[in-house]
Amino acid sequence: MRGYLPYVLGAALGLLVAFLLNGAFGIGGTPQLLLFGLLPAIGGAICERMTSRN
């Protein structure tokens, strides 16, 4: 489980950003689905990659 921690934290940060963007701009429909689908995945991948370099 410890190996997944960076990905989970990055995904949580991506989800938080998605919530903030959705609240600020009132995005709906397909863009909202893309926002909530892509940002957690991208955030998790970036965070995992950054921690694996160290």
Image: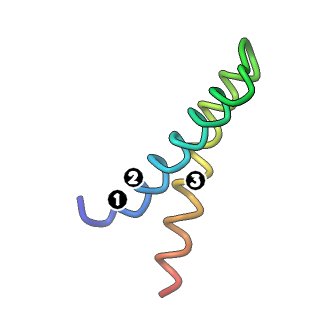
**Mark with earlier residue (3, 2):** 2
Reading the chain from its start, which is encountered first: label 3 or label 1?
1
Say which of marks 3 and 1 sits in front.
Answer: 3
Amino acid tagged 1: Tyr
The reply to whether discs 3 and 2 touch (Cβ–Cβ < 8 Å) is no
Residue that lies at the very extreme toward the left in this rendered image: 1
Above or below, 20 against 48 in this view is: above
Q: CA distance from mark 1 to mark 2?
A: 6 Å
Q: Which quadrant would the N terminus be assigned to in this image?
A: bottom left
Badge 1: how crowded within 10 Å, few (<14), some, or many (20+)? few
Classify residue 31 by image quadrant.
Answer: top right
Residue located at (41% from left, 56% from top): 9
Q: Are marks 3 and 1 in contact (CB under 8 Å)?
A: no
**Three-letter code, disc 3:** Gly
Residue 35: give x, y in percent of width and height: 67, 32
Q: Give the CA separation, mark 3 to mark 1.
A: 13 Å
Residue for badge 1:
4
| Residue 12 against residue 9 in the figure, above or below | above
Q: Is residue 6 left or right of residue 2?
A: right
C-alpha span from label 3 to label 2: 9 Å
Answer left or right for 13 relative to 35. left
Quadrant for residue 32, please give it.
Answer: top right
Eye-nearest disc, 1 or 2: 2
The residue beneath circle 2 is: 8
Percent from the top left, x then y, of residue 8?
A: 39, 52
Mark 2 residue crowding within 10 angstroms, few (<14) / some (14–19) / many (20+): some
Residue at figure coordinates x 67%, y 35% from the top left: 21
The residue under label 3 is 43
